[in-house]
Image (cartoon, helix red, strand yellow):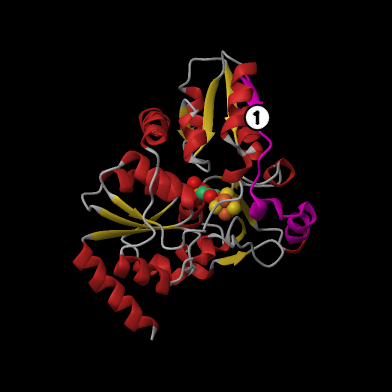
Amino acid sequence: MENNLKDKILQLKKKRGAKILAHYYQRGEIQDIADAVGDSYYLSKVAKDCNEQVIVFCGVKFMAESAKILSPEKTVILPVMDAGCPMADMAEGHEVEELKKKHPKAKVVCYINSSAEVKALSDVCCTSSNALNIIRNIDEEEIIFLPDKNLGEYIQEQVPEKKFIIWNGFCITHKRVRHKEIIQAKDIHKDMVIVTHPECEKEIRDESDFIGSTGEIINFVNTSSNKKFLIVTEEGVLHQMDSKDNKEFYMPGGSMVCVNMKKTRLEDVYNSLLNMKNKIELKEDIRIKASTALKNMHKLGG
Ligand code: 13P
Ligand code: SF4
C-alpha cells in the first residue's frame, strides 16, 4: 500500500515537473521520497537554485514561505497548511517594530524560523548553521536577535564583543529536554557523546560535546569514530544516521518529537500534488521586503 502510494507520488511528481524537499525532522517515508533532504539552510539554497517550477516543501510553514519569498515565480506547495512552527509565532510584526524604535542603531537578525512579516522588518535572516558567520560579518555592534533566545545566547557567547538584544522565544520541542536526563545518560554510559541543537537551553548545551544544526549533527555522527551518541534534537534526524560499525543512538526522555513536522504524511504529499493545492501565497509588499533579509543571509552566510 505504502509502496503503491510512493510510486504514485513519483509519477505525479514527474508529470507536474516538481521537486520534493524534506527537512530532516520529517517522517522517514517522506525523507525517502524526497529529491533533497536537509537542514533549513541547505533546503533554502536548493529551493532558490533549482530549475523545477513546482516545489513541494515537506517541512513547516516558514520553510515553504522562505522558498516562495526568494522564488515568487515558482509554485510552492506546503502539503499540510497548518504545519506551523510555534517558535516562529512568538514574534509579531508590531512587537518587532516597537523594539526597533528603542534600538534604532541595531541590526535586526531574524532566525529563519519566523513569519514573512517579521522577515520583512529584519536586515538579515540566519539559520543555526550560518548564524555565527552572519553575525561576524555584520559591522554594527548592536544586534537585535529574534525569535530564539537559546540560539541568540549561544551566538552571543561566541561573539562577546557585540551587544545583543535577544527575544524571548523558544522551541517547545527542544525546551522539553531536562538537565537531569542528560546527567543520567552520562552516568550510565560514560563513553557517550552528546550532540545537541542550539535551540536547547544553556544548561543542556553546556553538557554537550558537539552543537550544530540538524545537518551538522548528522554529519558529525556519521563521520565520528565514537560508538555511542545521545542525540539531543528531534528524532527525525535518526533516519539519516548510519548505524554501521555498531553505532548506538539514544535520546533524552526516550525521544523528542515536533508534532508539526510529523503532520505531513504520504497521502498529503500525493493529494496536494494531485490537486495542486496548498500553494503558498504572500502579499507582494511583504514578500519584497522579506526577500532582502533572505538574500542577505545567502550573501553573508555562505
Ligand atoms: P535546522 O536549521 O538545524 O535544520 O533547524 C530547523 C529547526 O526547526 C530546528 O528546530
Ligand atoms: Fe519549530 Fe521547534 Fe518544530 Fe523546529 S522543532 S519546527 S523550532 S517547533
Between 165 and 190, the residue placed more toward the observer is 165
Q: Answer yes or no: disc 1 within 8 Å of ligand 2.
A: no
* Amino acid on which disc 1 is placed: Ile
At a point 51% along the width and 41% down the height, the residue shown is: 115
Q: Is residue 50 above or below residue 286?
A: below
Q: Secondary structure at mark 1?
A: strand
Q: Which residue is mark 1?
A: 166
Percent position (x, y) of residue 157?
Answer: 65, 29
User: Tag count in the figure?
Assistant: 1
Percent position (x, y) of residue 153?
Answer: 65, 33
At a point 45% along the width and 52% down the height, the residue shown is: 219
Q: Residues within 10 Å of mark 1 (few under 14, many from 20)?
A: some
At a point 40% along the width and 39% down the height, the residue shown is: 283
- Whether residue 281 appears in magenta in the rendering, the answer is no
Is any part of residue 12 visible from this angle? yes
The stretch of residues the image draws in magenta is 158-186
Looking at the rendered image, the quarter that the N terminus falls into is bottom left
Q: Is residue 85 above or below residue 300?
A: below
Is any part of residue 159 visible from this angle? no
Looking at the rendered image, the quarter that the C terminus falls into is top left
Percent position (x, y) of residue 98?
Answer: 63, 24
**Occupied quadrant, residue 158:** top right
Percent position (x, y) of residue 133?
Answer: 47, 29
Q: Is residue 174 left or right of residue 52?
A: right
Q: Is residue 130 left or right of residue 295?
A: right
- Whether residue 180 appears in magenta in the rendering, the answer is yes
Taking the view exactly as shown, the residue that stands out farthest to the bottom is 1
Between 86 and 23, the residue placed more toward the observer is 86
Q: Is residue 290 above or below residue 29?
A: above
